[in-house]
Amino acid sequence: MQVEVTEHRAELKFCTCCQKQVVASFPPEVKAHTQYGNRVRSWVVYYQNQHLIPEDRIQQLFMDMYNLPIATASIATFNKMAYEKLEAFETKVLAFAKEAPVKNLDETGFRVGGKTQWMHTLSTPDCTYYHVSPKRKSLIDGVKGIAVHDHWRPYYQMPDVTHALCNQHHLRELKALIEHDKEAWAGQMSKLLRLMLRCRHRYGDTPIPQHQTSRLEQIYDTIVERALAWHESRPPLVLHKIIRGRPKQRPGHNLLLRLSHHREEVLRFLHDAKVPFTNNDAERDLRMVKCKQKISGGFRTSMGAEYFARIRGFISTLRKQELSIINSIEAVFSGTISVLSGR
């Protein structure tokens, strides 16, 4: 592909009456003697924040494919420009996600300047918001509605939130109990949760008949009660060292207590068609953060992490809105950002 170069010339006029020279104005986006166009800027931002390509490889890519040299400082400048222009869009996304009836929450650690910081996500089927914090418990304020999460305890400190638990986490824990601890109840619960999910899919957005949900809940309660009685009859764990506080319990016992105490949150998907069975929306949005750390390493500065979070949230939202990624990023640099819409 050939790089298209546009040369702008400004005509000069000299007035013989007033003895003054008048120079035509350049287009407002032309601010330097030599500069990259919006298409090059958008591709650089796209490669780095969507495909997680490091700076040196972006430079090599542009030389190999377009014979176009790009300095490291230019790459950083493009990301900074996109970050600044996307401030209003990010504010709209955050407000939209907070008010959505159902949202997914998750968090993960990543390295910034050699230290661990945290990336929180607030996800809906229509948008994605990322929040960077040096503290894991720095939660997003003002969230309302139903929040689907993985039972991380600080989420329960959020006011005005109704909780729903991720059952994919439960299935993974049940699988471990089946394979390693050979606990029979785990297989029964795993089959029951999958049956509930098939039942939910069968009825789609319509309510499941009351007699079916009652029967499924009755089986659920029976499995939990019998398994709890079995665990409580077992001898306590033998520990090699003294641990203060609550006695240590087996993983299966801990899972059963969660399934018992948070029964309504575990089964919320069964009664509300809007509630997903899993927290995969948030996990999927965070997965690329971990991929970036593995491919490109951590961030050198906190500002770099902020740039990535805002731009990555924009790209993720565009994909959920089924909009063109490249054209939308180019529109950011030209000042015509895509409008956020709900489905």
Image (spheres, helix red, strand yellow):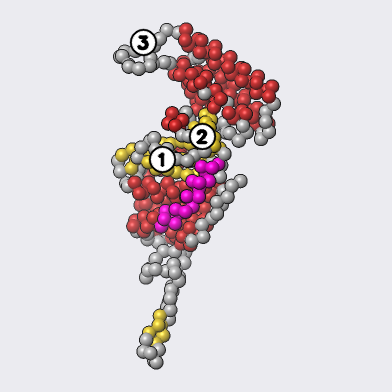
Secondary structure of the residue carrying tag 2 is: strand
Q: Nearer the viewer, residue 216 or 315?
A: 216
Residue type at mark 2?
A: Val
At horizontal 42% and vertical 31% (from top left) the residue drawn is 154
Residue 17 lies in the magenta-colored region: no
Q: Determine whether label 1 and label 2 are within 8 Å by CB.
A: no
Residue 90 lies in the magenta-colored region: yes
For the residues labelled 1 and 2, the Cα–Cα distance comes to 20 Å
Expressed as whole percent of the image width and height from the top left, the position of residue 7 reads: 43, 73
Expressed as whole percent of the image width and height from the top left, the position of residue 331 reads: 50, 59
At horizontal 50% and vertical 18% (from top left) the residue drawn is 256
Residue type at mark 3?
A: Val
Which residue is under mark 1?
A: 119
Query: Is residue 19 visible in this depiction of the protein?
Result: yes
Expressed as whole percent of the image width and height from the top left, the position of residue 316 reads: 50, 46
Disc on the earlier residue, 3 or 1: 1
Compared to residue 123, the image places residue 243 above or below, namely above
Residue 268 badge: none
At horizontal 59% and vertical 30% (from top left) the residue drawn is 269
Which residue is under mark 3?
A: 238
